[in-house]
Image (cartoon, coloured by chain):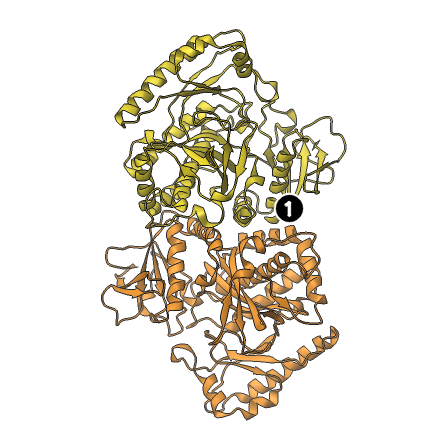
Chain colours: A yellow, B orange
């Protein structure tokens, strides 16, 4: 099944598809050369939105959940990529300690954990789960909807190493995005590989750093292809001192939103796009589709009602929002069964291993789809559909469209790599 | 569809399957450590035979054809493995020169070439075909059964480099096994990567070197798993001065066949195997299922008729047979649609990328199946079937059986790596 792209203006993206297909060897070589200089994030998922006139990543997750939404057919690809990743990091590894999120009652999330265990076990590691939840003092069995179980164990920290009872891992893989802050138990682990690094967690990470890195990547890539980087790059601005509850810093938001809306308007005019621009206001740190707002007119920001203020004030794990990113809104014109849909692309190491559509029947084309009520349609990326099919008419071939999505997602992953290098607190600096 | 394993004695292999599954992390780690010391062949395919009481590789092809027999679903896996291989060898590569076999009228073979072009193009390379056929002086278009075409071009050699007109490759990939001898045009190319290396071609390579290396690998692996290496290792002997046409050297064949049959008989007795042992006599260099004979009694070798002598004398490209390997025969008890079947496993770099069953309705369980009349059933290895499925009963699960085949095939690939290192004419020696 191929989602429908419902928009009159598909010219720019069809042209982009054409150019990406023609330039495939050059693009793949460019990625290879980038990976000689930069280390890809261990794993990642990227939300992509296709507006017909523009195709851009809107969120890059460095602690991806949802691996369970990938089809079974993609498992070999994920296992092979995991093997490649392990070989690079710790080839002599026997044991992998996986630290998931604490919310052990969310069975959807547990299915994701189960899938990760499966992938890394089949890549040749003994995988066990350690929890950051202090209330778990004994090995605890969690039941999954399919009748299987997962065992979660309390962490054992020594001066230099982290492990479990009778389990000393070479690598510690975080599937916990550290929204609640940097846990002390994870600090100072210089003998083991902790992946992703601590500064990839939302306690440190900022979306604005990511999209600044993405802008750099998009410009390089656009130069390679001889195109306008705006076609793949969502513009953004940020405000550092916002307090929605008290109404502080709203003037910063307003002036930035206004300026950004003007910039988008100019671009729309340049490309003859008959749409009303919008921006997305969201927490600069954090995830889970919380604290997100669509703004079509900067004036709207002065008249926020109590409900919206509350919604924007606090995100996951009760963290208060003070830093805010204002991002160019990219409408999504893809539909699956009449629901608004956006592709999510999954990567392990530098490889695209699968993807699915996030579909939300009750949300608009200019709204965040990562919200309760979303469903997941893995079909479209299944099998060999992410490999391009040269010769097909632009816009008419699912494989070609998905290859293009995979390229854009890898650009965002590369930006993640730039971002982590730029924000690494332990980075050596050369003057 | 899963082929039937038709034999009363499946105990030893079911036990092996069980042990391989339980030891999966240890096995994968062992491979990772081996690949730190040894370079995998660029690509390979391995014929495996499952006798129920024994599971062994019987042929390792370092210039695999038949990629077209893999399913479409396996393409992403092959592309990902090809990407990993290229990254290691020549990440800055733009161009790949593929040198296929000369037989340009064999459309099955051309479909294989087309599939290879597709895999390496999708891995991000400009791929063009150069031919060793001196009669092709101009770019020549070859027609394929599916209506597509391939362009084959004459090679252009300069003092230091090999290429085509307006095409200077970083890597030259041979899909020609050099049975006809070492072409001068390929010699002295020190600036480019020539893969597989010249000494992997049948002009230099010997099966006996391969199986000597395999014996070493099998012993190491058997030690890891605590089992008898014979369960996965076909015994062999060789004769260096045989002339079938003139009847010379037959005494060497006979005494070796006799000794080998006795050794097999002892092993059969040890394991309570109620079978009549046999050995396979074949050319020590060469391929294409030519020059192969099944021998159940060493006396049979004294009474070879003219037809058999002729058959054994000359193999591919008219090469005369003088060196002969005598290999323990491993019956195959797998059946697809009543035809005798053997799995063939395909690898690119260190990764299993797919496989199929070679099926021959008119051949016996103790005969070579690589012969006219063979057909190919790709189904069984499709999708995620080569990933193991823990918990299934030994012998009852196709994924587990195929994971085991993938392990055995990788042992043979590793032996190929040992073999190429041992026979490398340019190897540095440290005293």
Q: For the view shown, which residue lies furthest in the right direction? A: A138
**Mark 1 secondary-structure assignment:** loop
Can I make out residue B211 in this image?
yes
* Label 1 Cα neighbours within 10 Å, binned few <14 / some 14-19 / many ≥20: many
Q: Residue furthest front?
A: A338
Q: Foreground residue, A48 or B201?
A: A48
**Chain of the residue on which disc 1 is drawn:** A
Residue A287 vertical placement versus B195 (above, below) = above
**The quarter of the displayed image where residue A37 is located:** top left
- Left/right placement of residue A297 relative to residue B278 reads left
Can you see residue A37? Answer: no
What residue is at 64 percent from the left and 82 percent from the top?
B259
- Up the image or down, A181 lies above or below B69; here it is above
Task: Tell me: B94 left or right of B288.
Answer: left
Rendered-image quadrant of the C terminus of chain A: top left
Residue B377, relative to residue A20: is it above or below? Answer: below
Q: Position of residue A310 (x, y in %)?
A: 56, 13
Q: Residue at x 70, y 63 (%)?
A: B14
Depth check: give the residue in front, A92 or A296.
Answer: A296
Give the mark count.
1
Judge whether A265 appears above or below A113 on screen. above
Q: Can you tell which quarter of the image residue B393 is in?
A: bottom right
Coordinates of residue A358 in the picture (x, y in percent)? 50, 34
Coordinates of residue A330 in the picture (x, y in percent)? 40, 27
B196 relative position to B257: left or right? left
Residue annotated with mark 1: A94
* Residue A288 spot, x, y in % from top left: 55, 26
């Amino acid at each position: 099944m191929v989602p429908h792209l419902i928009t009159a203006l598909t010219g720019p993206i069809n042209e982009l598809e054409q150019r990406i297909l023609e330039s495939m060897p050059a693009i793949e070589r460019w990625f290879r050369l980038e990976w000689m200089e930069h280390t890809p994030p261990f794993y990642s998922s990227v939300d992509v939105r296709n507006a017909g006139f523009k195709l851009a990543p809107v969120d890059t997750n460095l602690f991806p959940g949802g691996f369970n939404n990938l089809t079974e057919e993609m498992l070999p690809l994920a296992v092979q990529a995991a093997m490649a990743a392990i070989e690079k990091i710790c080839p002599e590894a026997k044991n992998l300690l996986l630290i998931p999120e604490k919310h052990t009652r969310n069975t959807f999330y547990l299915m994701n954990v189960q899938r990760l265990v499966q992938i890394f076990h089949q890549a040749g590691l003994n995988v066990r789960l350690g929890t950051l939840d202090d209330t778990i003092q004994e090995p605890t069995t969690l039941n999954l909807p399919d009748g299987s179980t997962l065992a979660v164990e309390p962490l054992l920290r020594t001066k230099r190493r982290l492990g479990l009872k009778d389990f000393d891992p070479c690598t510690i893989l975080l599937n916990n995005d550290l929204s609640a802050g940097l846990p002390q138990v994870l600090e100072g682990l210089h003998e083991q590989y902790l992946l992703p690094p601590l500064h990839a967690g939302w306690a440190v990470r900022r979306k604005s750093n990511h999209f600044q890195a993405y802008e750099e990547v998009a410009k390089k890539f656009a130069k390679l292809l001889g195109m306008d980087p705006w076609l793949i790059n969502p513009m953004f601005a940020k405000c550092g001192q916002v307090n929605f509850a008290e109404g502080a810093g709203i003037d910063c938001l307003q002036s930035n939103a206004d300026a950004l809306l003007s910039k988008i308007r100019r671009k729309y005019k340049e490309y003859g796009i008959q749409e009303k621009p919008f921006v997305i206001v969201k927490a600069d740190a954090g995830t889970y589709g919380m604290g997100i707002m669509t703004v079509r007119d900067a004036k709207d920001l002065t008249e926020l009602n109590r409900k919206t203020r509350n919604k924007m004030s606090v995100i996951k794990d009760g963290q208060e929002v003070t830093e805010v990113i204002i991002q160019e809104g990219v409408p999504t014109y893809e539909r699956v069964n009449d629901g608004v849909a956006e592709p999510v692309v999954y990567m392990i190491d530098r490889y695209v291993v699968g993807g699915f559509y996030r579909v939300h029947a009750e949300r608009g084309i200019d709204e965040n789809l990562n919200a309760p009520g979303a469903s997941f349609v893995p079909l479209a990326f299944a099998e060999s559909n992410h490999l391009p099919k040269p010769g097909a008419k632009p816009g008419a071939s699912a494989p070609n469209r998905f290859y293009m999505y995979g390229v854009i997602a890898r650009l965002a992953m590369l930006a993640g790599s730039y971002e982590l290098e730029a924000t690494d607190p332990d980075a050596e600096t050369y003057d």
